[in-house]
Image: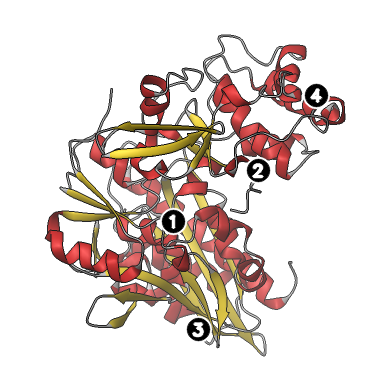
């Protein structure tokens, strides 16, 4: 079947099997390998991307389901040419060790900060409860999110509007 | 790499079209809503539908609203919406308490109420919630809209009253003024299926239990409930002793099976403890002592 998916504001399309998972579409068809393919069982969250502005696990979403919709991946976070405050927070607070979970963590936490700009630790931990860090670096990931919340005005507010149409939708769910 | 076996994908743009697709493709067609139960089962070849009918475009089935003296929840409503619903929080805190421990936030962004109920996993949380609240399901086909009591909805593990060519479109729960409700779950780790779970609502009149509902998940309770325990509590003051009696009935009547989540005696113990907690908190809320 033919799918057309807006990825990070750009139109993409391909002839795919209906059973192709969104994570494999992004990595193997579009060539965006920032989205990691992890547990394959919707547990680890390494494959988290935004579908119409809502973070979802792309290993449990068909590319076919994203046909006609907008996807945002980790590659779009520095789309303005400047790292997202969250990415800077991960650098400042050593929020990653091996880095495998990081793309999913970033996409989940970016959605959290967009809806709750100053989340407390409990809120952050609850938000990333579907993202597993096997290095168990949660302390620093939480600190990184707090850093981003504290420094949002320095970078986030001045960033240009991301080109992805759906990415700007508020997470109403 | 885990990938489903090949299938044909169809997207429905209306309820009529979804029903027509189900009728055309027969019993080997399955509805695809959130997909967070079905797609993992397809990856494992535990399910192998020939056709998937994607109903995610049917946003008219995504709502939580007051409808007369009932609360109506569209079958395509995402778990995250139920968790955040102010209407449900006002009338039935049991929903938010159950939703908060269903999977994780990302899965809840995608998974749906209707999908969870139709999956009919014996450990599924909302099945216990709707059984406790004595909700009704509205099942749609090209011939009719029929109403099914949630306590008759499940025909067994992974089997429901929804037949070929039918779609679960709505869940309905009666508004019970002054009722208190609560949900309790023990899970091995955050987001896991329940080892055991219990939900309850209690309605008081003059300090006496005017009505009560008990839901049980993951412990082999017939239709996710225990009417004998409800009967024992109805008409009584919700004292610790009376609640303990009702909880003991649940412990004895449920039929848990031993698995990797625990042995039978442990699950029976959990059923008793969790029913006690759920009834106690629901009673306090009905009494207005706890928000």
> Which of the two discs, 3 and 4, sits closer to the camera?
4
Circle 4 chain: A
Residue name at image x 58 percent, y 24 percent = A74
Circle 3 chain: B
Q: Residue furthest bottom?
A: B206
- Mark 1–mark 4 distance (CA, rounded to whole Å): 34 Å
Q: Which mark is residue B234?
A: 3
Identify the residue under disc 4.
A147
Q: Same chain for marks 1 and 4?
A: no
Q: Position of residue B284 (x, y in %)?
A: 68, 70
Answer with mark 3 or mark 1, whichever residue precedes in sequence.
1
Helix, strand or loop status at disc 1: loop
- Mark 3–mark 2 distance (CA, rounded to whole Å): 51 Å
Identify the residue under disc 2.
A168
Identify the residue under disc 1.
B112
A70 up-or-down from B168: above or below: above
Image-quadrant location for residue B180: bottom right
- The answer to whether marks 3 and 1 mark residues whose Cβ atoms lie closer than 8 Å is no
Mark 3 surroundings within 10 Å by alpha-carbon count, few (fewer than 14), some (14 through 19), many (20 or more): many
Q: Position of residue A146 (x, y in %)?
A: 78, 28
Towards the viewer: A133 or B138: B138
Mark 4 surroundings within 10 Å by alpha-carbon count, few (fewer than 14), some (14 through 19), many (20 or more): many
> Which of the two discs, 1 and 2, sits closer to the camera?
2
Answer with mark 4 or mark 2, whichever residue precedes in sequence.
4
């Amino acid at each position: 079947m033919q799918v057309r998916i807006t990825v990070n504001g750009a139109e993409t399309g391909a002839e795919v099997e209906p059973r192709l998972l969104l994570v494999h579409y992004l990595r193997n068809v579009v060539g965006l390998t920032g989205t990691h393919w992890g547990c394959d069982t919707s547990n680890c969250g390494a494959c988290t991307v935004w579908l119409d502005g809502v973070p979802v696990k792309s290993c449990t979403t068909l590319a076919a389901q994203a046909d006609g919709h907008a996807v945002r991946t980790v590659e779009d976070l520095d789309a303005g040419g400047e790292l997202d405050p969250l990415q800077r927070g991960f650098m400042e607070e050593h929020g990653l060790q091996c880095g495998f979970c990081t793309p999913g963590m970033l996409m989940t936490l970016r959605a959290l900060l967009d809806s709750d700009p100053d989340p407390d630790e409990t809120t952050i931990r609850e938000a990333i409860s579907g993202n597993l860090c096997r290095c168990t670096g949660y302390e620093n990931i939480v600190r990184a999110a707090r850093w981003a919340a504290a420094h949002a005005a320095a970078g986030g507010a001045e960033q240009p509007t991301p080109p992805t149409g759906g990415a700007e939708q508020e997470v109403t769910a | 790499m885990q990938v489903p076996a090949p299938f044909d994908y169809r997207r429905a743009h209306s309820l009529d079209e979804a029903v027509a697709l189900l009728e055309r493709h027969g019993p080997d067609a399955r509805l695809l809503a959130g997909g967070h139960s079905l797609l993992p089962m397809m990856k494992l070849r535990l399910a192998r539908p020939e056709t998937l009918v994607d109903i995610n475009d049917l946003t008219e089935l995504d709502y939580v609203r007051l409808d007369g003296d009932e609360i109506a929840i569209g079958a395509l409503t995402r778990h995250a919406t139920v968790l955040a619903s102010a209407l449900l929080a006002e009338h039935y805190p049991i929903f938010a308490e159950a939703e908060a421990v269903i999977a994780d936030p990302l899965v809840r962004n995608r998974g749906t109420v209707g999908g969870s109920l139709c999956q009919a996993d014996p450990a599924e949380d909302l099945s216990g919630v709707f059984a406790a609240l004595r909700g009704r399901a509205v099942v749609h086909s090209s011939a009719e809209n029929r109403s099914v009591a949630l306590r008759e909805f499940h025909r067994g593990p992974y089997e429901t009253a929804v037949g070929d060519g039918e779609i679960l479109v709505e869940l309905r729960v009666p508004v019970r003024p002054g009722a208190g409700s609560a949900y309790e779950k023990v899970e091995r780790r955050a987001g896991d299926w329940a080892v055991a779970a219990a939900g309850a609502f209690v309605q008081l009149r003059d300090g006496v239990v005017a009505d009560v509902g008990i839901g049980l998940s993951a412990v082999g309770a017939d239709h996710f409930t225990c009417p004998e325990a409800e009967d024992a509590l109805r008409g009584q003051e919700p004292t610790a002793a009376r609640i303990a009696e009702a909880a003991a009935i649940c412990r004895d009547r449920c039929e848990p099976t031993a698995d990797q989540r625990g042995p039978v005696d442990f699950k029976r113990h959990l059923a008793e403890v969790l029913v006690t907690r759920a009834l106690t908190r629901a009673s306090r809320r009905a009494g207005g002592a706890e928000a």
